[in-house]
Image: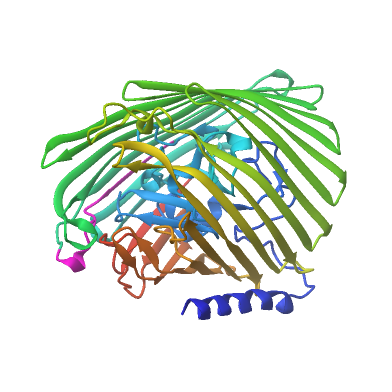
């Protein structure tokens, strides 16, 4: 079956060019590749066709067209990205890029690292990241430590929140649906020549599903509730200067089920609750000099997370941690062919009373010997308080011999310093934590080709990637602590395609083949070899629009067994009653597929929501 799926997808991709014609069409809206999109996550802002790196862009318009509530469901559509969530409605959600572990994915929100410093591996839980305030998501694939330092060993998810709109504008929305779900919110924004602001709030509650799969006899619903507040404001200063601040606060409670040895996934109904409060905030100052040829950015960032778990109503676990970031970046444009970005940053982390810090300096150089060739090189030096120094390098090339063709290649190194938990935890007879832990390191490269039709109706792209990660940190009962005992090898290719059949119908598809193994040749857990999706975007002239998303995930090896492959179909649509009033709906799992993302954890059956949005 996987081979058949691969053949069908490849045939569809290769046929796009033959169907394309020279007639002008409206701009393709699918997010996988656009030549007019500027990528901010590469630190030296570049058009997507000039980055040389493999990047997927997911815009607010595309997120809205999918009708999803949480970022994890939009990120899942990017080729090469796989998702594992232990139950909908607040279940912990992990994002893996090209087979790298979720702890090796660095998450940045408005320039601030948001990974959890208190978790064992320092990963980020996407389950609570609401889409209401997201303007765009950039998924940078491969080792990116030269750009962002520690933790960017497998890739980066760079999230940019919404900016204020010109004038005064606002929205109010409310929706209800299956499993007792209610979600509502409002936002207000405004902008003048001197200042701008945006403020929003969102709440979501649901009776939920049983985290332990209902098909295994688990009937207790696990409730979920979250509240989100976001704020952004800025002052426009003389000489094109700008002082800006933003804040994103989330308070959520999610019920989950208990460990039960012998049941599928060792999971069954139980009375467990996780309460989490998260905050990310930053204050930045941008000061351009010499008519904008020398840009200066100063940023102070802060992220904080507090988690409290309860079992049968009694406290069972708690943790609290934060990160403080201090960053300067300067960008000098010498001429049209030469740009230099350089900077320094410091990150102080604290988790449950233990502290650590890391200092970094970096430089990136962009060289454009001609209009069709862009070469970017970079080097970075990080000095960790406990583990000493680590130097990483990066090289990327983008060649555009014709407006219809882009050739790209990139090579980079990554590293991940041991987390506070890994350096302090010990058990099982050990008397102290392992003081000899080394950072995890990786080396990765990819090469890509993008072809576009003359009229802009079609686009196809393919990227081959290869990544080798060494000194992976894992727990060892033999020493009662963590040590460097693992290796991971990941290679494969990604395909995407877009074709605009008419002004109102567009089709996009993606596919990824990921061969991910450990140092002994065993398949890595929770990484499907085959994954992909097909999306039909429908937007005729008139009041309504919608899309159909067909999402496939191949079988995965779970630590407790095998998770079968699955295919799910979701449908969403919107209808404008007027210029200011819109109703929308989403049907998830249209054909009631029975599937799991993690062994033993259930997923929603056929379900849906209906909502209304008022704008002014």
- Residue at 34% over, 66% down: 563
How many numbered callouts?
Answer: 0
Task: Tell me the colour scheme of the image.
Answer: rainbow
Taking the magenta stretch, the answer to whether it contains residue 92 is no
Percent from the top left, x then y, of residue 221? 18, 56
Q: Nearer the viewer, residue 499 or 513?
A: 513
Quadrant of the rendered image containing residue 554: bottom left
Percent from the top left, x then y, of residue 231? 46, 31
Is residue 586 among what the camera can see? Answer: yes
Q: Nearer the viewer, residue 142 or 469?
A: 469
Is residue 48 among what the camera can see? Answer: no
**Position above or below: 294 against 537:** above
- Residue at 26% over, 27% down: 431
Taking the magenta stretch, the answer to whether it contains residue 209 is yes
The magenta segment is: 200-217
- Residue at 79% over, 68% down: 454
**Position above or below: 338 against 454:** above
Compared across the picture, whether 508 is left or right of 366 comes to: left
Compared across the picture, whether 351 is left or right of 492 comes to: left
Percent from the top left, x then y, of residue 561? 30, 64
Q: Nearer the viewer, residue 174 or 68?
A: 68
Q: Residue furthest top?
A: 238
- Residue at 49% over, 55% down: 99
**Position above or below: 290 against 597:** above
Q: Nearer the viewer, residue 273 or 531?
A: 531
Q: Residue furthest front?
A: 478
Quadrant of the rendered image containing residue 558: bottom left
Quadrant of the rendered image containing residue 87: bottom left
């Amino acid at each position: 079956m996987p081979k058949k799926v691969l053949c069908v997808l490849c045939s569809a991709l290769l046929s796009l060019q033959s169907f394309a014609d020279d007639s002008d069409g409206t701009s393709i809206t699918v997010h996988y590749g656009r030549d007019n999109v500027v990528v901010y996550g590469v630190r030296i802002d570049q058009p997507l066709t000039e980055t040389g790196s493999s990047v997927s862009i997911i815009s607010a318009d595309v997120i809205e067209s999918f009708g999803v509530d949480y970022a994890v469901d939009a990120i899942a559509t990017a080729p090469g990205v796989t998702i594992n969530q232990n139950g909908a409605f607040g279940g912990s959600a992990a994002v893996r890029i090209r087979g790298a572990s979720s702890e090796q994915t660095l998450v940045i929100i408005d320039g601030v690292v948001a990974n959890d410093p208190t978790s064992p591996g320092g990963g980020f839980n996407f389950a609570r990241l609401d889409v209401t305030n997201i303007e765009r998501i950039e998924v940078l694939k491969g080792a990116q430590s030269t750009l962002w330092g520690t933790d960017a060993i497998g890739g980066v998810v760079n999230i940019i929140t919404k900016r204020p709109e010109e004038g005064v504008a606002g929205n109010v929305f409310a929706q209800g649906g299956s499993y007792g779900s209610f979600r509502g919110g409002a936002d207000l924004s405004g902008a003048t020549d001197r200042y701008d602001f945006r403020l929003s709030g969102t709440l979501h509650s649901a009776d939920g599903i049983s985290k332990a799969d209902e098909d295994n006899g688990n009937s207790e619903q696990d409730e979920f509730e979250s509240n989100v507040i976001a704020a952004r404001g800025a002052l426009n200063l003389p000489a094109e200067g700008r002082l800006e601040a933003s804040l994103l606060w989330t308070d959520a409670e999610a019920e989950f089920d208990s460990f039960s040895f012998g049941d599928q996934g060792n999971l069954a109904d139980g009375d467990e609750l996780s309460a989490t409060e998260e905050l990310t905030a930053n204050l930045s100052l941008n000061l351009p000099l010499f008519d904008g040829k020398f840009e200066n950015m100063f940023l102070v960032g802060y992220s904080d997370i507090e988690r409290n778990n309860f079992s049968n109503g009694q406290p069972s676990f708690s943790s609290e941690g934060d990160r403080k970031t201090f960053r300067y970046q300067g960008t000098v444009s010498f001429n049209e062919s030469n740009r230099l970005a350089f900077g320094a940053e410091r990150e102080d982390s604290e988790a449950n009373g233990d502290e650590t810090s890391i200092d970094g300096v970096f430089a990136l150089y962009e060289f454009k010997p001609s209009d069709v060739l862009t070469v970017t090189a970079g080097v970075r030096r990080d000095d960790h308080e406990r583990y000493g120094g680590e130097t990483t390098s990066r090289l990327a090339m983008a060649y555009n011999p014709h407006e219809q063709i882009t050739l790209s290649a990139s090579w980079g190194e990554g590293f991940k310093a041991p987390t506070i938990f890994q350096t302090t935890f010990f058990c099982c007879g050990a008397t102290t934590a392992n003081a000899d832990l080394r950072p995890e390191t990786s080396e990765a490269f990819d090469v890509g080709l993008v072809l576009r039709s003359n009229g802009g109706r079609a686009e196809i792209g393919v990227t081959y990637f290869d990544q080798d990660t060494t000194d992976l940190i894992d727990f060892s009962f033999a020493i009662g602590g963590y040590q460097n005992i693992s290796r991971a090898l990941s290679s494969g290719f990604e395909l995407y395609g877009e074709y605009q059949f008419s002004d109102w119908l567009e089709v996009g598809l993606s596919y990824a083949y990921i061969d991910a193994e450990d140092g002994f040749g065993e398949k890595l857990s929770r990484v499907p070899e085959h994954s992909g999706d097909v999306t039909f975007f429908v937007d005729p002239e008139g009041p309504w629009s919608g899309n159909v998303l067909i999402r496939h995930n191949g079988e995965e090896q779970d630590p407790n067994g095998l998770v079968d492959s699955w295919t799910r179909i979701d449908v969403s649509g919107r209808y404008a009653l007027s210029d200011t009033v819109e109703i929308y709906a989403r049907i998830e799992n249209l054909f009631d597929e029975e599937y799991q993302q993690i062994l033993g954890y259930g997923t929603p059956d056929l379900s849906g929501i209906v909502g209304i949005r008022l704008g002014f």
